[in-house]
Amino acid sequence: MNQPPGLNQLCVHTITTKPWPLDRAVDAYQAEGIQGISVWQDAVLQSGLKQAAKTLEASQLSVVSYVRGGFFPHTSAGQRQKAIDHNKLMLEEAATIGAPLLVLVCGSDPAQSLSISRDQIREGLENILPYAESLGVKLGIEPLHPMYADTRSAINNLKTANDMADQLDHPYCGVVVDVYHLWWDPDLEAEIMRCGRDGHLFSYHICDWKVPTADMLNDRGLMGEGCIPLKKIRSWVERAGFFGFHEVEIFSNTHWQRDQMEFLRDVVHAFQHHS
């Protein structure tokens, strides 16, 4: 296995330190030697788009991605158009803060089949891809764990995401590998190699799956707290040709209640020793 990643590859999502406003997160990340930041829309809305852009531009952090667009499927054509309009707005916000990638949680509607929802996701992506390219912001399809297939995403493994990226066949459309959602997949290694070979591997998210998990949404663990084979998956990602940022994305009611500076230092330590 290659050497452990250095801090120059560490990116932290603002949702990881959710209690902090954007300016506090930026200052703390820099103080700990973190090099990248992925910005959630709620942090931008809290500070205001113009101020968020100024804060990020004045920092030494690389803006890695903007989170999260998507949610295309709906039984109503009017609601599907609203989703398209919202994603175009998010693309504009991403461009304003200097984010090169919009991460997509693609959505699902339990009132219809998953196959129909997937067709609507593809149609939504086809609609916004020309605008994304005009703004210089790529789109990253993030497959979610099957437990979220009801409302959050009809794309539940990396093969489905790769298939859609292949169908769309556009340089601004690729996939996001998030270990929390994909670690269980017996085809994960082959599909990581596939998206690396096809040039579709845009982003890599890390955390851990705690045992037992108290909350399926908000009980993610620090790297090393759970059962995900992080170092093995990293070796696959690197073998696939990806040497970009490792984005720490932790939703945790437990960790959000802690002193966030202490938690952030634990994030850095866990990244260096367990990822």
Image (spheres, grey):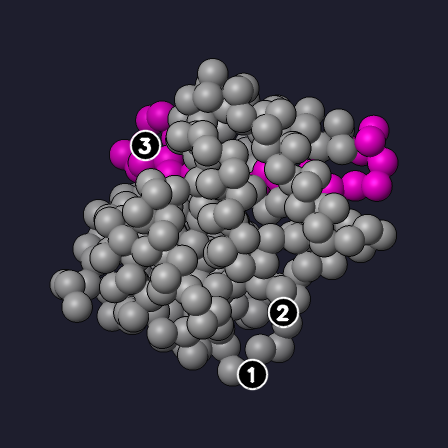
Range drawn in magenta: 50-79
| Residue 74 falls within the magenta-colored stretch | yes
Q: CB atoms at circles 1 and 3 under 8 Å apart?
A: no
Vertical side of 209 occupied by 146: above or below: above
> For the residue labelled by badge 2, is the local secondary structure a helix, a strand or a loop?
loop
| Residue 262 falls within the magenta-colored stretch | no
Q: Position of residue 39 (x, y in %)?
A: 47, 40
* Comparing labels 1 and 3, the label whose residue is closer to the camera: 1
Mark 3: few, some, or many residues within 10 Å (few <14, many ≥20)? Answer: few
Instruction: Say whether residue 239 is left or right of residue 75.
Output: left
Mark 1: few, some, or many residues within 10 Å (few <14, many ≥20)? Answer: few
Residue 79 can be seen, yes or no:
yes
Tell me the residue that label 3 is attached to.
59
Tell me the residue that label 1 is attached to.
212
User: Which quarter of the rendered picture does the C terminus lie within?
Assistant: bottom left
- Give 161 or 85, whichever is nearer the viewer: 161
Type of residue at label 3? Ser
Q: Disc 2 to disc 3, how far (Cα)?
A: 34 Å
The part of the image, by quadrant, that contains residue 90 is top right
- Give 185 or 39, whichever is nearer the viewer: 185
> For the residue labelled by badge 3, is the local secondary structure a helix, a strand or a loop?
loop
Instruction: Say whether residue 112 is left or right of residue 135.
Output: right
Instruction: Say whether residue 96 is left or right of residue 2.
Output: right
Tell me the residue that label 2 is attached to.
216
